[in-house]
Image: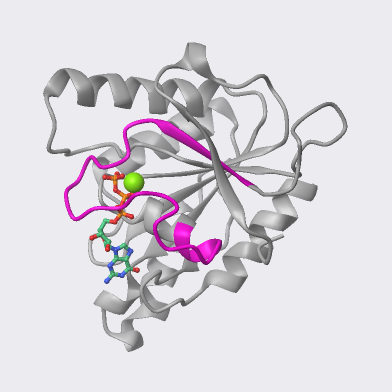
């Protein structure tokens, strides 16, 4: 699946523009600037497919990506869609816009029937913050399966990665909807991507 070219199919600015329920959706959520869009590009080996930026608040809609070559009609649906999300937390944009994206993110996460799994991205340098905890609690409450992915591991000492994974595993141990294993990735250095690809394929099938 990840050897096919991937394409952007739709940007969703509000819940009423969501596509009809179709293939399983796998969403990437996380604080602004954590590296969601960069991770999509790294997963599908296409720099520039999802737009990235140094400035937090780059992604402003739910952006749908699918492997190319499916018509989307009837039986010819793609096996899964990856959904890049606006970040939560700080963004360099007017407050009313940020509030609107945050509402969209929260509504989508708790109310989308075809949402199979959420990858919640956490910056390796910062760890789980209060607003991440809020999102994890929302997913627990809505019983939406999620897994933690540490990002930007190239920014910390390699020797510190196993310890960070272990600490993070301990922090989510009692959360009912959390997948127990934590993944570590670097989009910059292409690390941890095969494990994440395998996990995504697994949950799209299951
Ligand atoms: P929003 O859409 O604004 O919420 O941000 P995002 O989570 O999509 O982050 P994005 O992918 O745009 O990346 C934010 C910044 O982090 C960019 O400057 C990226 O180049 C950088 N970045 C992303 N992943 C990595 C990584 O693995 N390593 C390093 N060193 N930088 C990264
Ligand atoms: Mg983004």
Residue 23 can be seen in this image? yes
Q: Quadrant of residue 177?
A: top right
Q: Residue furthest top?
A: 16
- Please check the rendered image and state whether residue 113 is part of the magenta-colored stretch, yes or no: no
Q: Position of residue 50 (x, y in %)?
A: 41, 50
Q: Which residues are magenta?
A: 41-66
Marker count (numbered):
0
Name the residue rendered at 38%, 58% in the picture: 38
Q: Quadrant of residue 134?
A: top left
163 left or right of 28? Answer: left
98 left or right of 28? Answer: left
- Please check the rendered image and state whether residue 45 is part of the magenta-colored stretch, yes or no: yes
Q: Position of residue 111 (x, y in %)?
A: 55, 20
Q: Residue furthest bottom?
A: 159
- The correct choice, above or below, for 181 with respect to 75 in the image is below
Residue 182 can be seen in this image? no
Q: Nearer the viewer, residue 187 or 139?
A: 187
Q: What secondary structure prevails in the magenta region? A: loop
Q: Nearer the viewer, residue 175 or 199?
A: 199
Q: Nearer the viewer, residue 53 or 110?
A: 53
Q: Nearer the viewer, residue 135 or 59?
A: 59
The quadrant the N terminus occupies is bottom right
27 left or right of 39? Answer: right
Report ligand 1 position as a quadrant: bottom left
Q: Position of residue 77 (x, y in %)?
A: 78, 36
Name the residue rendered at 39%, 52% in the picture: 36
Q: Residue furthest right?
A: 75
Name the residue rendered at 31%, 25% in the picture: 101
Name the residue rendered at 51%, 74% in the picture: 192
């Amino acid at each position: 699946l990840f050897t096919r070219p991937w394409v952007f199919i739709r940007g969703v600015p509000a819940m009423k523009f969501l596509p009809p329920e179709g293939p399983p959706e796998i969403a990437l959520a996380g604080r602004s600037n954590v590296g969601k869009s960069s991770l999509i590009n790294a997963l599908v080996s296409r720099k520039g497919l999802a737009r990235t930026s140094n400035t937090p608040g780059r992604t402003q809609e739910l952006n749908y990506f699918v492997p190319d070559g499916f018509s989307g009609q009837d039986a010819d649906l793609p096996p899964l869609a990856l959904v890049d999300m606006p970040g939560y937390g700080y963004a360099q944009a007017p407050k009313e816009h940020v509030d609107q994206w945050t509402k969209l993110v929260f509504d989508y996460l708790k109310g989308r029937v075809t949402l199979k799994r959420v990858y919640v991205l956490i910056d390796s340098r910062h760890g789980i913050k209060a607003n991440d905890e809020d999102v994890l609690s929302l997913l627990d409450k809505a019983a939406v399966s999620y897994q933690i992915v540490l990002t930007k591991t190239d920014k910390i000492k390699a020797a510190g990665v196993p310890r960070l994974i272990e600490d993070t595993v301990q922090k989510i141990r009692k959360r009912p909807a959390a997948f127990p294993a934590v993944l570590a990735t670097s989009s910059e250095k292409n690390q941890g991507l095969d494990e994440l690809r395998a996990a995504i394929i697994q949950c799209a099938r299951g």
